Image (tube, rainbow, N blue to C red):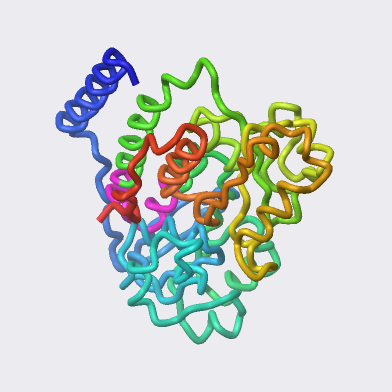
């Protein structure tokens, strides 16, 4: 980065710090209802969810929801968490999740009854039949849409913080995200004139990674072109070999999960790069196929800021020092 770029970044970061120091508009926690009153939160389906007390025994139906909730409230307020939370290849919150005793692969009605939650946070993909079954048992259920962009993540954190009666904690999470995103914008700015392009080789049956998904938006923030999105491929469409060849990326990002099919991680990479179908592709010609942990590819939560930095590093060298990477929380 040239001298002007460094000073510009420094100025923006100092300005951001000054704004934060002078900010007095942090949302206040909602007032506690009286014994006869209820506290209301409106979920993403427009349902008014009523609670008589601050939730203390929370369950979610999805790992990404676990991640956002644990970023807003401490582990003592979660009665169960996804088993995935303890896999460092996927999770940023292994340490924070450790005190939570009940670990689940999936949510069953029987398990929910035994845990006696006072709030369930579900994704729309949980299904209305299951959601209604929980509600029929008298358990409040707050439904959140899946996050397909950084802005969606912020919106989810805001609504979850309200449902958990912790708006100030949610605001702090978003503040920490914004601080890192401003830093990213400064550092990747010099590469805007000649951005690199990539293709994600996803473990999700080659249907994840097109235009409109979280990975696509993270690439945008990293100033990296999502090559399949550039040629019009939408998320959910199959990213075939033919599509990859047409996209002609500068580098491939390989989901680390693929190595499970091989005796060592280099096998799949070499097999992939030596595929005759890819010999005209820039990434194959230069040997640019980079393994990524899944936590950097499917980060539909507040820790997406670290994934964005990781993508930028893959494109432009180690422009970010990820030693400071940590679970982002508001408490």
Q: With 185 as the anchor, is 246 left or right in this view? A: right
x 56%, y 46%: residue: 147
Q: Position of residue 37 (x, y in %)?
A: 35, 62
Name which residue lies at 70% across and 56% down: 204
Inspect this view and state whether residue 30 appears: no
Q: Nearer the viewer, residue 35 or 89?
A: 89
Percent from the top left, x then y, of residue 228? 71, 34
Relative to 140, say whether 111 is above or below: below
**Would you say residue 162 sits in the magenta stretch?**
yes
Q: Image quadrant for the C terminus? A: bottom left
- Give the side of residue 93 with respect to residue 222, left or right: left
Q: Is residue 266 visible?
A: yes
- Above-or-below relation of 91 to 20: below
Question: Percent from the top left, x then y, of residue 279?
Answer: 78, 38
Most foreground residue, 127 or 137: 127
Q: Please identify the dominant SS of the magenta region.
A: helix
Residue range (magenta):
157-172
| Left or right of 279 on screen, residue 296 | left
The outermost residue toward the top is 4
């Amino acid at each position: 980065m040239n001298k002007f770029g460094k000073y510009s970044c420094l100025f923006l970061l100092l300005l951001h710090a000054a704004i934060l120091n002078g900010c007095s508009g942090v949302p206040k926690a909602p007032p506690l209802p009286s014994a006869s009153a209820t506290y209301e939160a409106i979920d993403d389906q427009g349902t008014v969810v009523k609670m008589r007390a601050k939730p203390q025994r929370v369950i979610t139906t999805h790992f990404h929801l676990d991640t956002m909730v644990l970023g807003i409230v401490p582990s003592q307020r979660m009665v169960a968490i996804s088993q995935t939370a303890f896999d460092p290849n996927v999770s940023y919150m292994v340490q924070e999740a450790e005190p939570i005793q009940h670990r689940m692969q999936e949510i069953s009605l029987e398990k929910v009854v035994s845990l006696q939650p006072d709030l369930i946070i579900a994704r729309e993909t949980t299904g209305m039949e299951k959601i209604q079954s929980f509600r029929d048992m008298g358990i409040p259920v707050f439904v959140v849409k899946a996050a397909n962009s950084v802005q969606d993540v912020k919106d989810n954190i805001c609504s979850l913080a309200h449902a958990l009666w912790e708006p100030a904690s949610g605001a702090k999470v978003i503040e920490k995200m914004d601080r890192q995103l401003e830093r990213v914008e400064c550092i990747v700015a010099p590469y805007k004139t000649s951005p690199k392009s990539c293709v994600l080789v996803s473990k999700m049956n080659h249907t994840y990674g097109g235009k409109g998904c979280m990975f696509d938006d993270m690439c945008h923030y990293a100033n990296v072109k999502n090559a399949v999105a550039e040629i019009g491929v939408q998320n959910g469409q199959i990213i075939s070999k033919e599509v990859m060849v047409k996209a002609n990326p500068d580098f491939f990002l390989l989901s680390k999960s693929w190595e499970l099919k091989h005796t060592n991680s280099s096998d799949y990479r070499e097999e992939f790069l030596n595929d005759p179908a890819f010999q005209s592709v820039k990434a194959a010609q230069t040997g640019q196929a980079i393994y990524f942990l899944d936590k950097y590819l499917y980060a539909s939560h507040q820790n997406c800021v670290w994934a964005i930095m990781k993508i930028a590093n893959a494109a432009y060298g180690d422009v970010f020092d990820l030693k400071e990477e940590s679970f982002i929380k508001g408490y």
